[in-house]
């Protein structure tokens, strides 16, 4: 059994869906579970629907939902002939489900409504693609993943109940050869839809791979594989053909947008290799991520923008010891912020964080009961793993460096332009 995952960019128009069919055709003799995201920017569109609805703007919510609807109808009209009516009936059921909800008044929390609306994106995309594959002779079974993935009711960030989910997914083993189902969504035991956090489809795919003891998971993307830097910022970024699970976790931690970080654990636990492949050219080798430690890695470069640096100074000139530090960490936990870098001195602590006005301003205000606080904004955090002097000098030349932190493997530089 192999598991494939196709993200939003790989299914965002008619040609891309036809291309997906071409890829699946290459593997159709083997048992396959295909996990698919919502098309293109559908999830963002549905987020706006949920927001308008919750703000009491029913007309606007319905209008925005209609845009999503028309987009999916147009794509199905282009793609389908014999299966069009069958697909339309199923799509209409999903549309109706959301429209009923949008006619109500919100009485529960926002995150609940968010999940009930946003989950439709994946249901629509998989419904169309499954019908299209069947019409193209790639016989497959569509599954509503909400019948398989059981979660708690932490809406927008639901946690999977592995026992129930395993029981259900294991039953798939002797069913069809090819399954098509949704990433990112699940269901509580009260039959309410949940989502697993933005970009969560990679994680769903890893959960399936783990439970089915898959021989591999392939994530199909619009890039050649995992690169050592963002090719949009560094045109001569190079492909890394092999990486260890640990290296990928490290890269994600420093902000590389490679794979959803939750994806790695379920694969690592069962030693299942993860292939990052290019959906534009399946013959390219891509990147394999597995247990083996990768040797001779090139410098891996990650830049995080919109960083803030909190300067915290002891109020009475005493050392910043364990007491104030433990209170500081309690504040991080309370405000749900994760520092990207911390440097401590005798009477001061510097903390680099992703800047989000709502969170960081509150955090800074509360920290001022413990320290004298200054907040510096509009900074960038450069991380280089496996650095060497040449790369370091090249990337920091002419920058106004605020802070540097270095270990044997990794150097981090906080700077303003
Ligand atoms: N459609 C969801 C999102 O855009 C999940 C995913 O693409 O992985 O976040
Ligand atoms: Mg996506």
Image (tube, helix red, strand yellow):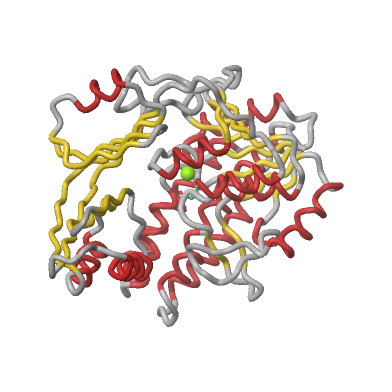
**Which x, y percent locates residue 123?**
58, 53
Q: Quadrant of the N terminus?
A: top right
In the rendered image, which quarter is residue 320 located in?
bottom left
- Residue 59 visible in this rendered orientation of the protein: no
**Which x, y percent locates residue 250?**
46, 40
**Which x, y percent locates residue 358?**
24, 64
Residue at the image point whose x is 33% and y is 34% from the top: 411
Q: Left of 251 or right of it: where is 372?
A: left
Q: Is residue 243 above or below residue 198?
A: above
How many numbered marks does the figure carry? Answer: 0
Q: Left of 75 or right of it: where is 2?
A: right
Residue at the image point whose x is 37% and y is 36% from the top: 407
Q: Quadrant of the C terminus?
A: top left
- Residue 209 visible in this rendered orientation of the protein: yes
In the rendered image, which quarter is residue 63 located in?
bottom left
Outermost residue, bottom side = 107
Considering depth in this image, is 130 or 241 the residue closer to the camera? 241
Residue at the image point whose x is 80% and y is 51% from the top: 172
Q: Left of 144 or right of it: where is 175?
A: right
Residue at the image point whose x is 63% and y is 33% from the top: 290
Considering depth in this image, is 397 or 11 the residue closer to the camera? 397
Considering depth in this image, is 34 or 140 the residue closer to the camera? 34
**Which x, y percent locates residue 114?**
44, 66
Outermost residue, right side = 174
Q: Is residue 111 above or below residue 34?
A: below
Q: Is residue 179 above or below residue 145?
A: above
């Amino acid at each position: 059994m192999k598991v494939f995952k196709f993200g939003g960019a790989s299914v965002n128009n008619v040609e891309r869906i036809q291309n997906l069919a071409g890829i699946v055709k290459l593997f159709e003799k083997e048992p396959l579970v295909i996990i698919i995201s919502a098309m293109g920017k559908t999830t963002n569109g549905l987020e706006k629907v949920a927001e308008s609805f919750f703000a009491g703007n029913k007309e606007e919510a319905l209008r925005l939902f209609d845009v999503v609807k028309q987009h999916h109808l147009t794509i199905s009209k282009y793609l389908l002939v014999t299966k069009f009516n069958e697909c339309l009936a199923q799509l209409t059921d999903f549309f109706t489900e959301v429209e009923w909800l949008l006619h109500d008044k919100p009485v529960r929390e926002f995150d609940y409504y968010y999940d009930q609306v946003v989950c439709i994106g994946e249901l629509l995309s998989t419904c169309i693609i499954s019908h299209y594959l069947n019409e193209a002779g790639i016989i497959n079974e569509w599954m509503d993943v909400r019948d398989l993935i059981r979660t708690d009711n932490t809406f927008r960030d639901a946690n999977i109940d592995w026992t129930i989910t395993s029981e259900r997914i294991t039953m798939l083993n002797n069913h069809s050869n090819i399954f098509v189902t949704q990433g990112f969504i699940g269901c509580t035991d009260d039959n309410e839809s949940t989502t697993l956090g933005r970009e969560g489809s990679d994680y769903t795919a890893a959960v399936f791979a783990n439970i089915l003891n898959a021989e591999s998971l392939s994530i199909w993307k619009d890039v050649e594989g995992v690169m050592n830097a963002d090719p949009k910022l560094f045109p001569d970024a190079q492909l890394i053909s092999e990486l260890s699970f640990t290296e990928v976790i490290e890269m994600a931690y420093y902000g590389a947008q490679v794979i959803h970080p939750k994806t790695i654990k379920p694969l690592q636990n069962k030693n299942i290799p993860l292939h990052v492949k290019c959906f534009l050219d399946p013959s390219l080798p891509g990147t394999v991520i597995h247990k083996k430690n990768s040797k001779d890695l090139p410098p891996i470069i990650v830049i995080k923008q919109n960083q803030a640096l909190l300067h915290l100074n002891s109020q009475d000139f005493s050392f910043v010891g364990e007491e104030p530090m433990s209170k500081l960490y309690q504040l991080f936990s309370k405000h749900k912020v994760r520092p990207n870098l911390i440097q401590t001195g005798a009477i001061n602590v510097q903390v680099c964080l992703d800047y989000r006005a709502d969170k960081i301003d509150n955090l800074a205000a509360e920290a001022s009961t413990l320290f004298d606080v200054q907040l510096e904004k509009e900074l960038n955090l450069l991380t280089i793993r496996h650095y060497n002097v040449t790369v370091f000098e090249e990337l920091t030349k002419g920058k106004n460096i605020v802070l540097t932190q270095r270990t044997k493997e990794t150097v981090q530089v906080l700077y303003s332009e």
